[in-house]
Amino acid sequence: MINKKMKISGLAFMLLLAGIIFYLLFQEKTNNEKGEEESSTSTDRSSEENDVVAVEDFLIPTKGSRKDYSDAIQKAIDFCAAHKKEKVKLKANKKYTIKSGFTVKEGVKVEFGQNSILIVTGDFQVMNVEKDAVIINGTIQVMDPSFGSEVIYLKGNEQFDATNKTRIENMTIVNESGKHEGIGLSLYAKGPWHNISFVNFENISIVGFKTGIQLKAENPEGGTYSWVNANRFENITLEDCVQCIKIIGSMNIPNECSGNLFTGLQVQLTENTKQLLMVDGSHNQFESIVWDVQRIQNHDPLIIFTSKTEKNQLDTNLSTQYINDNGQNNEY
């Protein structure tokens, strides 16, 4: 009887010991996996941080006058492009004063932190945007009454085609100088085969400029063509601009401006507004809601389709009395 009890007790002990060993081995494996996961996460985080270029790393300390971040921003962009980094980051809740413009180079992403602001002092082209560049989440404030240039500028010599990944998103562009000069967003093509096409602009607010958005293609001559076609402008807000949207070109080659889409367009008119749309080209489409037309002081047409227009489409809440159509087969 004693031997039987001892055998049972011994068996129970062996099972208990095996259970403890199994538990310890399981815990060790779990801890190792957790450690590897944390190490991997830490490595990934470190890798992500190493891929972000900070503007402050390129700032040369100055005494006295307000800091000018122009050169530091350009150097950060140059470094990002040269070393294939993911993006240049402007810190959240910080103001960056610039006294000269910079170029966002091909393949570079410039990301503004939450509530970071670029303050423009002087008269110069603020951002020259190359093919495959990305700009997101920023506020640009023009403070200088002398400003009369373009804030965001794309030039057709970059030849933006269907393969391009250029994006400008979630931007607020404001002229706070009180002078209503300059252009908020400009697309310009003039030169042999210079073109801007298939670029996406989303969630952009433009306030207080002489011209909010301008698309322009000029004849390069010499038997070659330039065009600004097939671009998408989604969820754009325009407020207190003298001319809200201006498209300058032709219905076809050699300087065509056609097939550009403006959807989700919200326009706030003020006493300073003289023109909502001035359009050359064909097959451009506009979907807009316009606010407070009663504030307009002059009696000139708010929307003009020139003699160089054909088959453009306009969907708006404005009545036809505000439209002057000199083109062919435009719909509204």
Image (cartoon, rainbow, N blue to C red):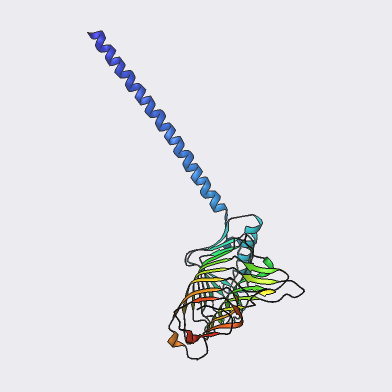
Q: Position of residue 220 (x, y in %)?
A: 73, 75
Please identify the quarter of the rendering in which residue 249 is found: bottom right
Residue at the far left: name it: 1
Please identify the quarter of the rendering in which residue 324 is found: bottom right
For residue 36, above or below residue 306: above
Residue at 52% over, 78% down: 331
Q: Is residue 60 visible?
A: no
Q: Position of residue 63 (x, y in %)?
A: 59, 71
Q: Look at the image and tell me in which quarter the N terminus lies.
A: top left
Q: Position of residue 106 (x, y in %)?
A: 64, 61
Of residues 17 and 137, the one nearer the viewer is 137
Q: Is residue 81 visible?
A: yes
Of residues 58 and 4, the one nearer the viewer is 4
Residue at 50% over, 42% down: 39
Total numbered labels: 0
Residue at the far front: name it: 329
Residue 9 located left or right of residue 171: left
For residue 99, above or below residue 92: below
For residue 47, above or below residue 309: above
Please identify the quarter of the rendering in which residue 86 is found: bottom right
Of residues 223 and 176, the one nearer the viewer is 223
Q: Position of residue 28 (x, y in %)?
A: 43, 32
Of residues 63 and 248, the one nearer the viewer is 248
